[in-house]
Image (tube, grey):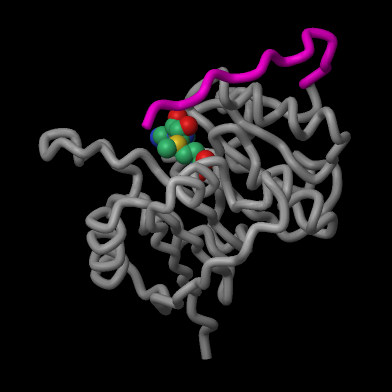
Amino acid sequence: MGRRGLRKIDPARDLAECLDELERVPQPLDAAEFFGHAAPLEVEMGSGKGLFLQAACEAHPERNFLGIEMARKYARFAAARLAKRELTNGKMIHGDGLRLFREHLTDASVAAVHVYFPDPWWKERHKKRRVMKPEFIEDIERVLIPGGTLHFWTDVEEYFETTLALIAVASSLEGPIEVAERPADHDLDYQTHFERRMRLHDLPVFRVQFRKPIAR
Ligand SMILES: C[S@@+](CC[C@H](N)C(=O)[O-])C[C@H]1O[C@@H](n2cnc3c(N)ncnc32)[C@H](O)[C@@H]1O
């Protein structure tokens, strides 16, 4: 299934408030300063066209959402969604999410991490390029606050099972907690564009949530 072309971004749209380059993101990241106001921070790895980020920002104005996307055209597209709706609790970063987590995000600073439909890298010799690898799982656990959550969805059953096994050995995250499919109320009422695509083609989606234990 190929990806549909992107609609053109209005050239007059100012993305300055909604888009940054990873190189310009402070190390370490002080999210309250970065967003201009303090709020629980949620981070999405590989935002694609930014449907999740937009919907989450609209549904939860009391939270800040940071999306990171490696592909510049998608990062710009997702940022344009936020700018068009004048959402001040969402920002897109263009760059490598693995580096954002490793080099910028501090311990226990993130309330939720979202990873939706990461590239599957089907071929055996390419699987090392997958983002759900031990180093990233360790970083996810490190940056989450106690009680913070990881949300992982994919359409690839083998990637799903491999990741569950990895999380079990590489972290002390609690789960897996099953996540039920939600009926869509309208054409864009899906978690992400990839979920929409899979559901419209009647293909399965594997959804799971984990939680960082609260120290007793
Ligand atoms: C299959 S797409 C899914 C996009 C979106 N999450 C969705 O569900 O519609 C995966 C996205 O992750 C991005 N990506 C892959 N590796 C990344 C990385 N290390 N950092 C940031 N983005 C990454 C890709 O450029 C691609 O846009």
Q: Position of residue 76 (x, y in %)?
A: 65, 22
- Please, is residue 4 above or below residue 138 in the view? above
- Please, is residue 176 above or below residue 9 in the view? below
- Please, is residue 73 above or below residue 41 in the view? above
2 in magenta: yes
Evaluate whether residue 101 shows in this view: no
Evaluate whether residue 104 shows in this view: yes
Residue 88 in the figure: left or right of residue 193: right
Q: Position of residue 54 (x, y in %)?
A: 72, 43
Q: Main secondary structure of the magenta part?
A: loop
User: Residue at 57% of width from left, 63% of height from top?
Assistant: 108
Q: Where on the picture, by quarter, is residue 137?
A: bottom left
User: Residue at 54% of width from left, 18% of height from top?
Assistant: 5
Toward the viewer: 69 or 25? 69
- Please, is residue 145 above or below residue 69 in the view? below
Magenta residues?
1-15
**Count of labels shown?**
0
47 in magenta: no
User: Residue at 62% of width from left, 64% of height from top?
Assistant: 183
Residue 183 in the figure: left or right of residue 167: right
